[in-house]
Image (cartoon, grey):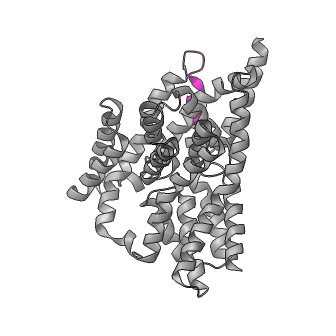
Amino acid sequence: MIFLELFYVFSKIGIFNFGGGYAMLSLIQDEVVNKHHWMTINEFTDIVAVSQSTPGPIGINCATYTGYTAVIHEGYPTWAAVLGAVLASLSVIWLPFILMVSISKFLIKHHDSKAVTSIFSTLRPVIVGLLAAAALMLMSKENFGDPTESPFVFVLSIILFLFAFVGTRLYKVHPIVMILLCGLAGLLIY
Amino acid sequence: MGIYTDIFLTFAKIGSFTLGGGYAMVQIMEKEVVDKKHWLSHEEFMDTLVVAQSTPGLFAIDMASHIGLKLKGVTGGVVGALATALPSIIAILLIAMFFQTFKDNIYVEKVFMGVRPCVVALILAPCFTMARKAKLNKYNWWIPVVTAVLIAAFGVSPIWCILVAGIGGFLWGKLKD
């Protein structure tokens, strides 16, 4: 039964996803391509590319796309495929959600306890480091262009990066407005 | 506007602009949830980041569940989580159904060449606000530096950094007593 399988596989993917998006790609690939043959490796690469250019967490994107494609491949009509897509997406969410509820309730209850206070006072500086690391790792050729092969793209990317950084930091431009502005700039200039 | 509608609309908006993974939405979420709606203080927002990072599941969804839960219990959490996921489900469904060639579209690629560096800046920018809110001083400035180097240069999982720092903080608290 395809719907039960989707539910099982994506629940598993959801609960084993520590540390976000890209960490879970190899897990998804193993389940969806190698074990269940719901899509080919090429289709999988395509969905990763699509995920990078659509909103939302990559895990949800993969689940939605796989749910739809897998049900269509089984010969069901479109409405059933839409149902499969929604089911797969919700399967990724529900187990971590229950876990999150328990942890949050515990933290809200013990918010003022000495132990929780001292743990969080060390963890806050760590989060600053985590964000810095995420930004550093994204400063790559894929995102900024190759300085030797495409110097124009590289220079323009640096300018857009500085523009977005200064704009949101100093002039308090809303991040959403900034994304739209940079997207428009890309469309007009390239 | 009811509080549930408010939670739903706020997180649907955040979900719609989460391009390039969970971290990119940190600044958008901080702006909406802390600056505009005053649902959380800056400190509480950072604690939410810690919790979301150290539990399984998708970062953005975890954040939304935790904030929704803080505001309105389990129902608030469900509304927040679903609202964050909804825009991406709809977008991918439309692409799966109608636009198989979406990613090959030259205009889409042009827009994203502009958006990608912006997303990196959006991830970097909140570090500076947070450094102040995390009360960084001459005794603990090395914590974020060591964390960033371990993760970015040595490929250490963020989970380990959080675990070690959490245990360290707990022991340090005990030691001071």
Q: Is residue A137 magenta?
A: no
Quarter of the figure that contains the C terminus of chain B: top right
User: At x 55% / y 47%, what residue is drawn?
Assistant: B80
Q: Is residue B147 magenta?
A: yes
Q: Indicate whether A59 appears above or below B124.
A: below
Q: Nearer the viewer, residue B145 or A118?
A: A118
Any part of residue B122 in sight: yes
Q: Indicate whether B167 appears above or below B152.
A: above
The spot of residue A99 in percent (x, y) is 72, 47
User: At x 35% / y 57%, what residue is drawn?
Assistant: B112
What is the residue that sits farthest to the top in this orientation?
B177
User: At x 62% / y 78%, what residue is drawn?
Assistant: A38
User: At x 74% / y 22%, what residue is drawn?
Assistant: A113
Q: Nearer the viewer, residue B50 or A68?
A: A68
The spot of residue A29 in percent (x, y) is 62, 68
The spot of residue A45 in percent (x, y) is 51, 70
Q: Is residue B176 left or right of residue A21?
A: right
Q: Indicate whether B31 appears above or below A79.
A: above
Q: Nearer the viewer, residue B149 or B93?
A: B93
Any part of residue A149 in sight: no
What is the residue that sits farthest to the front in this orientation?
B2
Quarter of the figure that contains the N terminus of chain B: top left
The spot of residue B54 in percent (x, y) is 67, 42
**What secondary structure is the magenta-colored segment mainly?**
helix
Tell me the magenta residue range: B138-148
Q: Nearer the viewer, residue B117 or B84?
A: B84
